[in-house]
Image (tube, rainbow, N blue to C red):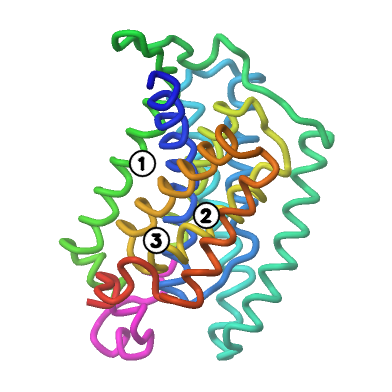
Amino acid sequence: MQLFIEQLINGWALGSLYALFGIGFGLVFATLGILNAAHGTYASWAAIIGYYAVERFGVPFPIAILAGVVGGGLLAMAVDQIGFQPLRSRKAGMLGALITSIAFWIILDSLAGFATEHQSLAFPAASYPSKMFAIGPLRIPQMQVIIIASLLICTAGIYLLIQKTRLGAAMRAVGWNEVAAGLGGVNARVVILLTAFLAGATSGLAGVLGGIATSNVSFTLGEGLMLKGFAAVVVGGYDDVRGTAIAGIMLGIIEVFVAQYISTEFRDGFTYILLLVFLIARPRGLFGSTSFMRA
């Protein structure tokens, strides 16, 4: 029983990383209509920025996370304004944006490889919380608690932002129709910039925390998050952060249990079987029919 609970917590923490990334990815798709293949590089670069903030400048753990989060957000804004804004002004459509995002993915991925010298780096052990919480016979790493708490806070915060604030209403309006939102007094470009920053920052947080938890800061870090985050968005509902959070946790738990009780070779296979099932049977995801982004 102890092993089962420990693996459940491991899966919850892993799934929280997928969900954090998926929330940012889903925000861009729901609000801007962009399937951004470069989104994974925001997580990679955030982890790299956080790592060098610690390694080169010796900043404390919270500042390193903040540096990575801000770096991911600013990178997302830059990609949007350099790559996607000209396409929006020309009404290029989703295909043009997808091709552009692939180009940015290749460029940013190559630069990330150069920044890490194509090696897997690791945060110094003394630079982040590494204690264990004891609950009876259970031993829970402090970083897992931080990851789970980060997802809960981000999910609640973004949900309330979109549901209860003027900015959230403007995001929903732009998601429905950018031109109509502009006619209604919404500054669509500002909303798009803020949405891009929020999406990049959320994915950046997943990158930094994932880089610490897995001791893997590399240019490939975002690729794994991208695949699993996309699955969380599809299963949960591309425009509902609640569904993405639940689906991400579910995927993480499934992965860990499959690896523990069946085989590590099939852990990814089960994830994509579930993805295919939802694409066929319920393409709008768990919460798609009552999507709050389109409320």
Mark 3 near mark 2, Cβ–Cβ under 8 Å? no
Give the CA separation, mark 3 to mark 2: 21 Å
Q: In this rendering, would 286 be left or right of 212?
A: left
Q: Are there few (<14), some (14-19), or many (20+) residues within 10 Å of tag 3? A: some
In primary-sequence order, the first of circles 1 and 3 is 1
- Residue 258 percent location from the top left of the image: 56, 41
Q: Residue at x 35, y 8 (%)?
A: 137
Q: What is the three-letter code of the residue carrying label 3?
A: Leu
Range of the magenta residues? Answer: 173-193
Q: In this rendering, would 41 be left or right of 150?
A: right
Judging by the rendered image, the residue that carries numbered circle 1 is 151
- Residue 96 percent location from the top left of the image: 66, 82
Q: What is the three-letter code of the residue carrying label 1?
A: Leu
Judging by the rendered image, the residue that carries numbered circle 3 is 194
Q: Are there few (<14), some (14-19), or many (20+) residues within 10 Å of tag 1? A: many
User: Toward which corner of the image does residue 272 lie, by quadrant?
Assistant: bottom right
User: Toward which corner of the image does residue 198 lie, by quadrant?
Assistant: bottom left
- Residue 158 percent location from the top left of the image: 29, 54
Judging by the rendered image, the residue that carries numbered circle 2 is 229
Q: What is the three-letter code of the residue carrying label 2?
A: Gly
Q: Residue at x 59, y 12 (%)?
A: 125
Give the CA separation, mark 1 to mark 3: 20 Å
Q: Nearer the viewer, residue 176 or 3?
A: 3
* Residue 211 colored in magenta in the image: no
